[in-house]
Amino acid sequence: MSVPYLMEDSREADRLTAKVDADAWVREYLAPVMPQGTPDVLDVGAGPGHIAQAVYRSWPRARVVAFDGSPGRLAAGSAGADGAVLVRRCGDARQLPFDDGTFDVVYSRLMLQYVAERDRAVAEMARVTKPGGTVVLFDLDGQLVWHDPVGPELRAVLDPVVDALRTTGFDPHTGRGLYRLAREAGLTGLTVRVDPYHLIAGAVNPAEREQWHLKLDIARPAIARALGSPEAADDAVRICLDHLDSAETLTYSVAFTVTGRQERTLGFG
């Protein structure tokens, strides 16, 4: 059984691809830990494989596996214009279908916030990493919940929606838990980095507004379930966009990156 994903929608693969400069992200967060030669690399929660393709572009000799819980999202990225040839595997991040010590670098970007049993997923990522290999965990803190001011209309939307999403395993503060999860998985030499992620001070720019509108529209069924009706979901989307359009508001979140080494010696037989 794969990890449930509350943003399941045919438009989600394109949204995920459009919202990030994949090559820049790879240069910033993966290049410092990528070994020379022909590294084996695993992207856990790869979506359409846009980050994995960027890894391949930077390291054409690498063996890159894009792993995701949705065959549809994986297939949506299979015809990448860059021609990257990736191995695509579908399954559950809490039970990775790979042998111990298979990969030199294992990374997860914005996946763990949707996984109820994050400890199992991170332990699995550590398990399939080679001794001396690296695990990179990248996730958000403050997703959906950090705004100022929070008026009564916005509060009436945020509280029940976030509470309902928590029942699916979603945690808006996943980022701050990554260090603990990495330690519990036995990773060593941990480094922690915190960067701004969402940062909208005043009225949102048109391109970013379009991204938020699409995100809220994809999330509309989950919002309707939380608030009790499609009409309530429509009002919630309007309230959120009105907040983003205001010159008087702030919306923000941060991204935690925790990097650790797998130092254990594997025993075979």
Image (cartoon, helix red, strand yellow):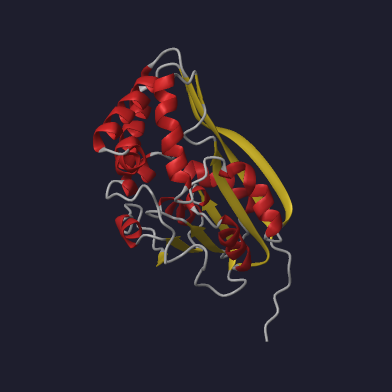
Indicate left or right for 51 with 14 as reference. right
The quarter in which the N terminus is drawn is bottom left
Q: In the rendered image, is residue 204 in sight?
A: no
Among the 4 quarters of the image, the one containing residue 207: top left
Q: Where, by quadrant of the figure, is residue 160 drawn?
A: top left
Residue drawn at (71%, 61%), measured in percent from left and top? 186
Frontmost residue, 53 versus 4? 4
User: Looking at this view, is 132 or 160 the one in front?
Assistant: 160
Name the residue nearer the viewer: 6 or 229.
229
Rendering coords of residue 246 (x, y %): 39, 15
Residue 213 position, x and y percent, is 32, 32
Q: Point out residue 12 in the picture as x, y percentages from the top left corner.
A: 33, 47
Would residue 75 appear left or right of 164 to someone viewing this image?
left
Toward the front, the furthest residue is 228
Q: Based on the displayed image, in which of its 4 quarters is residue 131 positioned?
A: bottom right
Q: Nearer the viewer, residue 233 or 250?
A: 233
Q: Answer above or below: position of 167 versus 155.
A: below
Q: Is residue 149 visible?
A: yes
Relative placement, left or right, of 101 versus 64 is right
Left or right, residue 141 beside residue 218:
right
Q: Quadrant of the C terminus?
A: bottom right
Q: Position of residue 118 (x, y in %)?
A: 56, 55
- Location of residue 155 with respect to 23 vertically, above or below: above
Residue that extends furthest to the left in the rendered view of this protein: 231
Extreme-top residue of the structure: 248
How many numbered marks appear? Answer: 0
User: Measured along the vertical axis of the image, is residue 38 above or below residue 51?
Assistant: below
